[in-house]
Every structure is written in C-alpha cells, then in structure tokens.
Amino acid sequence: MFSIELLQGDITQLEVDAIVNAANNSLLGGGGVDGAIHRAAGSGLLEECKTLNGCNTGEAKLTSGYNLLAKFVIHTVGPVWNGGTKNEEALLENCYRECLRIADELKLKTIAFPNISTGVYGFPKQRAAEIALGITNEYAKIATSLEQVIFVAFDAENYQIYSTLLE
Ligand code: AR6
C-alpha cells in the first residue's frame, strides 16, 4: 500500500528514489521532460543510455540518476497518439505498469511520474490521467516496497485533471 500524491512543477528537482522519463525509442534524449532530465543529469546519463540499445514503446529501462537528486531514472516510451487506433491505451498502461514493476524489483520507496505521452506525443490528457491513476491504484493492491507515488504535472491543465480525479 502506498500514498499517491500530486505536485505541480519540474520533475528534475525531486529528491526521490526514481523519476520516470517520457523518452523516445532511441533513449538518446529529446525535448520536453526528456530534455530537461538529460540537462539536469549531465552527460553521464546519455553515455549510459547509449549502451541500452533503445527501448520499445510501452516498455521501460533503468539507469542511474547521475547529477539528479533522484538515485535512478526509469526511461519509458509512451505511445504517439494516433486517434486511439494503434493500441495506444494498452501501451500507455504498460508504461506505468512496467515502471512500477521495475521500482518494486529494486525495492524503491518513492517514484515520481511525469504525464507520459501528453506533450508532443499528443495523448488526450484526461484519458492519460485516468490510465495513470487506474494502473497505479491497481498496483497498490499488491505487495510492494513502494511507499509514495508522486504524479508531477508541469502544465496547469494536467494539474487540474489529476486534482479532480484524486478528490
Ligand atoms: N517536469 C515535469 N514534466 C514536464 C517537464 C518537467 N521538467 N517538462 C515537460 N513536462 P513530453 P511525450 C511535461 O513532450 O508527450 C521528447 O522529445 C509536459 O508538460 O515531454 O511523452 C521525447 O524525447 C507533458 O505533460 O513527452 C520524445 O520524443 C509531459 O511532460 C517525446 O518528447 C510529457 O510531455 C515524448 O513525448
């Protein structure tokens, strides 16, 4: 059992066991939260990412956190929204499930998620938030090392959506 919390701000500033990165298939950096995480972590992160051979959509891979306050980064690749015809919902569910599973495997206590796929990948924010919280609530029912799961909204719209769903 763990608590679910909502914050608005920059995920790179959090002192947690792991932050999740909304990456792309190359795992070699990009814009948005991915760019912010690579800038804050420093070049060691990119060097480690180069050894991972990319990541499939809906899956996740672990690295160290380098200059971040977070000990680890769990890189996951959300789906690009294609109108809902390309299995996007199941793929996004898998991202959240895989990140939680990896955190659990490492016996982590705290993990922070950005709003995966809701930036340049265009996934509808309301539906993405329902998926994120749905999978997390489902996961909370099983035995886990996790004590705190934090959702970090960067934009006001996502913050509002999560606030309403968490009420
Ligand atoms: N802290 C927390 N959330 C953030 C931050 C931050 N510093 N910066 C942006 N966000 P996006 P995607 C929010 O576009 O849609 C990259 O180029 C943002 O407001 O970062 O999964 C990758 O390399 C939005 O709600 O990721 C991929 O090519 C959320 O993070 C592609 O973007 C996700 O937006 C992935 O697209």
Image (tube, rainbow, N blue to C red):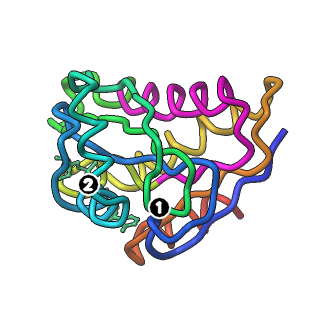
Disc number lying in front (2 or 1)? 2
Q: Which mark is residue 43?
A: 2
- Say above or below: 54 vs 162: above
Q: Which residues are magenta?
A: 91-113
Residue 42 position by quadrant: bottom left
The verdict on residue 162 being magenta is: no
Few, some or many residues within 10 Å of mark 2 (<14, 14–19, 20+): few
Looking at the picture, how far across and down is residue 74, in whole percent? 45, 39
Query: Mark 1 is on which residue type?
Result: Leu
Count all numbered tags in the image, as a single digit: 2
Residue at mark 1: 68
Q: Earlier along the polypeptide chain: callout 2 or callout 1?
A: 2
Q: Where's ligand 1: which quadrant?
A: bottom left
Q: Is residue 34 left or right of residue 31?
A: right
The residue drawn where x is 47% and y is 76% is 9
The residue drawn where x is 37% and y is 24% is 59
